[in-house]
Amino acid sequence: MVYGYVRIHSTDDEDAIESLIFQKIEIKRKYPKAEIVVEEWDILKSKKRPVFEEIVDKLVEGDVLVGAHFAELFISWSEAVNYIEKILDKGAIIHIPSIGKIDYSFDGKINLSIAKNSAEVFFEANKRFFSILEQRMEEVKKGSKRRK
């Protein structure tokens, strides 16, 4: 079975809908028969992704988990390491079209190395961004409490 995982932040946001369409096209281009699973998720509301966790739990040997981008499948490098090991130990494969297949083959290990290097830079930038965003949200909350 091929599962295409698509993560968006909101179905109310035009950019998110555009991202949803783009991710689906990326997955369907490689796997026309993939079962697309969409998860609406916001890191500021919850760190848990129940839809993603459910897919990972039901993967079996020979299944493929496809994500349009590494950062759509995983939210941090430490999370990626845990999930990649869990997925590969089941005999399933991870495929990110821009990187390639990640599995226990020689090529899969090279692709994982490439993913690691690019992901570390991306996740570090994201971590800084969300830290600033959370700080700003706290400032806004404090300001609205004072006005009451």
Image (cartoon, rainbow, N blue to C red):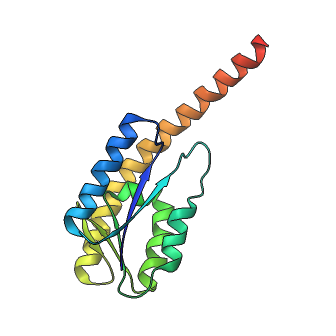
Residue, far left:
29
Q: Is residue 71 left or right of residue 41?
A: left
Across and down, in percent, residue 136 comes to 58, 26
The answer to which of 44 and 79 lies nearer the viewer is 44
The answer to which of 140 and 39 lies nearer the viewer is 39
Q: How many marks?
A: 0
Q: Is residue 27 left or right of residue 52?
A: left
Quarter of the C terminus within the rendering:
top right
User: Could you tell me which residue is drawn at 54 percent across and 68 percent down?
Assistant: 53
- The answer to whether one can see residue 75 in this image is no
The answer to which of 10 and 72 lies nearer the viewer is 10
Q: Is residue 86 left or right of residue 91?
A: right
Across and down, in percent, residue 111 comes to 26, 70
Quarter occupied by residue 140 = top right
User: Could you tell me which residue is drawn at 27 percent across and 77 percent down?
Assistant: 108
Quarter occupied by residue 29 = bottom left
Quarter of the N terminus within the rendering:
bottom left
- The answer to whether one can see residue 83 in this image is yes
Q: Is residue 81 above or below residue 20?
A: below
